[in-house]
Amino acid sequence: MEPKLAPYLRSPQGKKVFVPQFGDGLVMLACAKRGANVTGVDLSNEQIRLAEESSAYCGVNVNLLEADTQRLPEEVPIDYFDIAVAECGILGWIGSLMRG
């Protein structure tokens, strides 16, 4: 887990964690290994495939969605999650921080 995120995620057990554009998936997997109910969203079906393999290897379950983080499917309510965890690399994929 990235040292800067660790203080915020000391006790994610049982929390619903949203990880947009999860990239390598390490933060997402670290949260899941600590007992969080994790949903990861990424635009790339290859990233989804790799995350499925990684989560199986790590022995954790994560909910993975291939979607645009700014256009989540209706079955993912915006107020469902307790915490969102994003790495700095996501900023290149976000056109606007305002939901529209």
Image: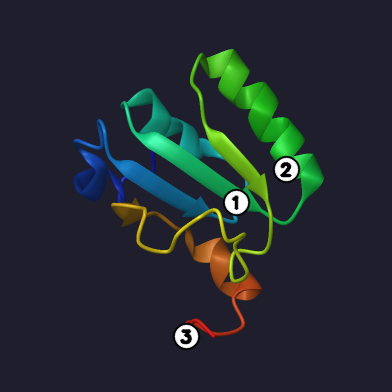
Say whether disc 1 or disc 2 marks the residue closer to the N-terminus. Answer: 1
Whichever of labels 3 and 1 marks the residue nearer the N terminus, that label is 1
Q: Position of residue 58 (x, y in %)?
A: 52, 17
- The local secondary structure at tag 1 comes to strand
Question: The disc labelled 1 sits on which kind of residue?
Answer: Val
User: Which residue occupies 55% across, 53% down?
Assistant: 75
Circle 2/circle 3 CB separation < 8 Å: no
Q: Which residue: 38% across, 46% down?
A: 17
* Residue 6 screen position, x and y as percent: 27, 43
What amino acid type is highlighted by mark number 2?
Gln
Q: Would residue 70 appear left or right of 37 to someone viewing this image?
A: right
Give the SS element for disc 2: helix
Could you tell whether 100 is left or right of 48 in the image? left
Q: CA distance from mark 3 to mark 1?
A: 18 Å
Which residue ends up furthest to the right in the rendered image?
A: 46
Tell me the residue that label 2 is attached to: 47
Q: Mark 1 or mark 2: which is in front?
A: 1
Q: Quadrant of residue 3?
A: top left
User: Residue 70 location in percent, x, y?
Assistant: 59, 71
Hey, what amino acid is under mark 3? Met
Report the front residue among 50 and 79.
79
Q: Which residue is mark 1?
A: 41
Q: Identify the mark at residue 98; answer none if there is no mark.
A: 3
Q: Would you say 47 lies left or right of 95 here?
A: right
Q: CA distance from mark 1 to mark 2?
A: 9 Å
Give coordinates of residue 13: x percent, y percent.
25, 31
Residue drawn at x 60%, y 56% as measured from the top left? 21
Mark in the foreground, 2 or 3: 3
Q: Nearer the viewer, residue 11 or 26?
A: 11
**Label 1 Cα neighbours within 10 Å, binned few <14 / some 14-19 / many ≥20:** many
